[in-house]
Image (cartoon, helix red, strand yellow):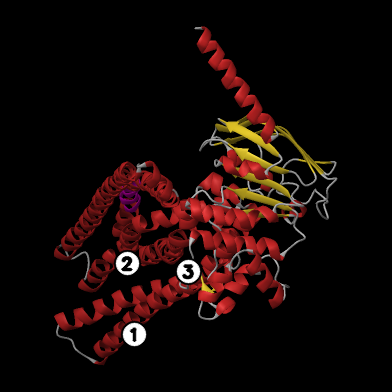
Amino acid sequence: MIDKRLFKLKGIINTLVGLVFLTGVQGLAILAQGIFMARAIVDFWQNKLSAATGVSIGLFALAFFVRQLLVVLKNQYMATYADKAVETYRTKLLEKYTENGSNIIVNQGTGNAVTILGVGLDNVKNYFQLLLVKVFDLSIIPWLILIYIFYIKWEQGLFLLLIFPVVIMFFIILGLAAQSKADAEFDNFKNLNNRFVDALRGLPTLKQLGLAEKYSDEIYQISEDYRKTTMRTLRIAMTSTFALDFFTTLSIAIVAVFLGFDLLNGKMTLLPALTLLILAPEYFLPLRNFSDDYHATLNGKNALTDVLSMLEQPAIDQQDSLKLTGWHDQNQLALTNIGFSYDEQVTLKNINLQVKGYQKIAIVGESGSGKSTLLNIISGFLLPTSGQINIANQTVPHLAQTDWQKQFFYMPQHPYIFHDTLRENIKFYAQQATDEQVLVASQKAGLSKLVAELPEGLDSIIGESGRQVSGGQSQRIALARMLLDDQRKILLFDEPTAHLDIETEYDLKQTIAPILSEHLVFFATHRLHWLDQMDYVLVMRHGTIVEQGEPQQLLTDVHSQLNQLRHELGGV
């Protein structure tokens, strides 16, 4: 129930020592509460009211107050630690995301990675607050009570000691069944997150293909599976709670019956019998409280397991093995037999490519052919599973190299626009740029109209919770970022105009074309009119390069193949 890796967290040992002390004091307060309550009741029953009766009532009230105060203090104590622990995990996760980049997204899925940072860490916080308090209550309080019960009546103490593991055994059996269902529920939850995020990202494409309605049915079916799994888990949880309540109530009833026989036979006086009867429910209460919160902590345990597993993912090997101060016209990049597999499914295979200097290379192919994956390999966002890479006469296992990634700009289909001023968005890669340089870059990128429309010009807030920009405007902002830093000589484009209308794409093309000169360019696209700006073309299909060459040469080959096909058909 408690992951051993939890004990590696900073400050956890001192926190648990403090929790043990508070729980021990609470256990003594519960004992005192039961003892003095029994004394006061016996005095009232026997009509022997005296100053001692008042003292018993006062001590009972004090013990009750201390008990409740310690419950509040323990919860607050663990809540404070849980907040610090969760923030520590959040910081470490963000560092891990930054360190390993999209490799985490490939392995975990976008939805799961985002969920862990949000809802997942909230569940971890509940796990810390609920589980540790309940576990230490269960580990300390019943045994303090049991020692006192043995002192009063060893036969009742022996019965309670023997019945405790029986109750726990039934709880474990039903708890394991609930945990199995909860694990399945959590897997469904992660699956739903990933599918939902992917659906949102691909919604424009689904609409264009007329598949939005069909995909909504699939999302509905996934959510229904999640709902059914959740209800099955709740049924088991309710059954286990009922079974636990039944056995503990039955055990207390048995104790009460034997105490009654002892009272009738004169083997026991009223005060110790009543004290035992009051303490018996307290003996089982920590177990019942643990049972009530056990199922609530299962999601937290699963989330903590995911967080710890993600943090233990190894850093990318040899991330700084490449030494590259800049990209020049004599530098070379060679990919030899590069392959990439995702979830045991081959996505790229036998990729061979050699480029030199400031070539402009188009990567074309239908959707799903591997264009974006190849671009992510080149950018270092994904690590190849096979093959060899040579860059500037240095052999490296992958391109997730610090010096390599300092040399390029990457423009995706949807550039990220930060909640900040337009000026700061443009200065993202070049914080040292002057206001004049920012203004010139915005004009060259075709942002003059947008700047004029904004109430505060370049100082207007855009992005989330600010002025929303169109797809074409966001691409121009990304271009302005490129123009502002002329030290980066490698440009990577991942279908930057895929979701733009023809008119906007044409205008954007006029802006992009001059930027491509004096740069090494990789341009993934399925729109062939970009080929007139390229020096070399890679044609991809099913994860392999099926053709490559200069654009005019490929067009000539295509025409030759068409003429040959016409000739063959004519012969038939």
Residue 168 magenta-highlighted: yes
Local secondary structure at mark 1 = helix
Q: Residue 7 location, x and y as percent?
A: 57, 59
Residue 226 magenta-highlighted: no
Q: Residue 76 location, x and y as percent?
A: 44, 76
Report how far apart the C-alphas of labels 3 and 1 lie in the structure: 54 Å
Residue bearing the label numbered 1? 62
**Sequence-wise first label, 3 or 1:** 1
For disc 2, the neighbor class at 10 Å (few under 14, some 14 to 19, many from 20) is some
Local secondary structure at mark 2 = helix
Q: 297 or 257: nearer the eye?
A: 297
Helix, strand or loop for the magenta stretch, by majority: helix
Q: Which residue type carries mark 2? A: Ile
Q: Which residues are magenta?
A: 164-172
**Sequence-wise first label, 3 or 2:** 2
Q: Residue 24 location, x and y as percent?
A: 44, 71
For disc 3, the neighbor class at 10 Å (few under 14, some 14 to 19, many from 20) is few
Q: Which residue type carries mark 3? A: Glu
Seen in the picture, residue 76 relative to 104 is either above or below; the reply is below
Q: Is residue 190 left or right of residue 269?
A: right
When asked about the image quadrant of residue 63, the answer is bottom left
Q: What is the number of the mark on residue 464? A: 3
